[in-house]
Amino acid sequence: MPINQSNQESWIKEFSNRRYQTLLVGANFVPHQREFHIIAMVIEGTILVKYRERNYALAASDTIFIPAGEIHAFYTPTNETALVNFHYIDTIEAYIVSEGITCPDINTLLETKLTTQSWAPELLSNLEKSIDSQHYTQWLSGFLLALSKQMKQMIKLEELDFDAFVAAKAYIQENLEEPFCLDDISLRFNINRWQLSRKFKPLFGVTLFQHIHASKMVKAKELLSQKNGISEVAYELGYSDQSHFTRFFKRFVGISPNKWVRLVSISNNN
């Protein structure tokens, strides 16, 4: 399993349901959110995690769970390194295997350590060990159920047109040039406006608003890395002007488009 050195600003990434190992070297990531749940297991060293305005120090063998949509950041002490194994959990897959049980509200990361340290080693102790899909489904179902029981939160998402929500999410990702709004999506997919507003986040981990702009920013980074101008990218992604686009870019990526372009240029020249 490859080890990636990460020591620059972080950003919202597209979902990738996999296990991987990262070597953090003096890392100081910009607070960000993901559209998937995260399990992190510290293999070596010490890391700091900021979550809901609190800082947590994690040492070797410590394991935590971060729900999708929660703003967080990973740090390492200055000039120190840490080796961390990660797993991303798709929110749709989590919804299906848990039969509609929503992700618990996690107030502090310490609340998740007991369950994750019991379940995560099977998945993350040996990244070279293959895990077939059936076994993973059983593991994920058991883990989510155990976490919900530990948190005493067994809330089921009722009366949901699952296929319509998934189709709406896919439509957004495939038509990023459109200036989406709640009423348009509600009408197009015949989803009650109130349901679309209230149930998008329990299903996908982020609000409809967050998903629209996070998806646009993923595409924006791709276009900017191909040397497209900032104003051109803003227009292509349906923003009314460059300042409007820049405001959302900084909100969801953590840095300005200009700084992003500079980072890409430095990376390409190294």
Image: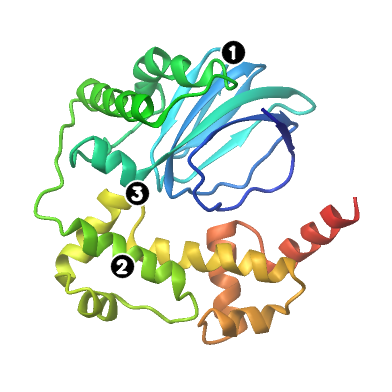
Classify residue 15 as left or right of residue 20: left
Q: Earlier in the sequence, mark 1 or mark 3?
A: 1
x%, y% of residue 191? 17, 70
Which SS class for mark 3?
loop
Q: Nearer the viewer, residue 130 or 194?
A: 130
Q: Which residue is mark 3?
A: 205
Q: Earlier in the sequence, mark 2 or mark 1?
A: 1
Q: Are marks 2 and 1 in contact (CB under 8 Å)?
A: no
Q: Position of residue 58 (x, y in %)?
A: 55, 20
| Front residue of this view, candidates 263 and 188 | 188
Q: Position of residue 196 (x, y in %)?
A: 22, 65
Q: Residues within 10 Å of mark 2 (few under 14, many from 20)?
A: many
Q: CA distance from mark 2 to mark 1?
A: 41 Å
Question: Residue tagged by mark 1?
Answer: 60
As drawn, is 21 to the left or to the right of 7? Answer: left
For mark 1, give the secondary structure. loop
The residue positioned 61% from the left and 25% from the top of the image is 84
Label 2 belongs to which residue? Answer: 168
Instruction: Measure how far apart labels 2 and 3 are at the Cα level.
Output: 15 Å
The residue lying at 90 percent from left, 56 percent from top is: 269
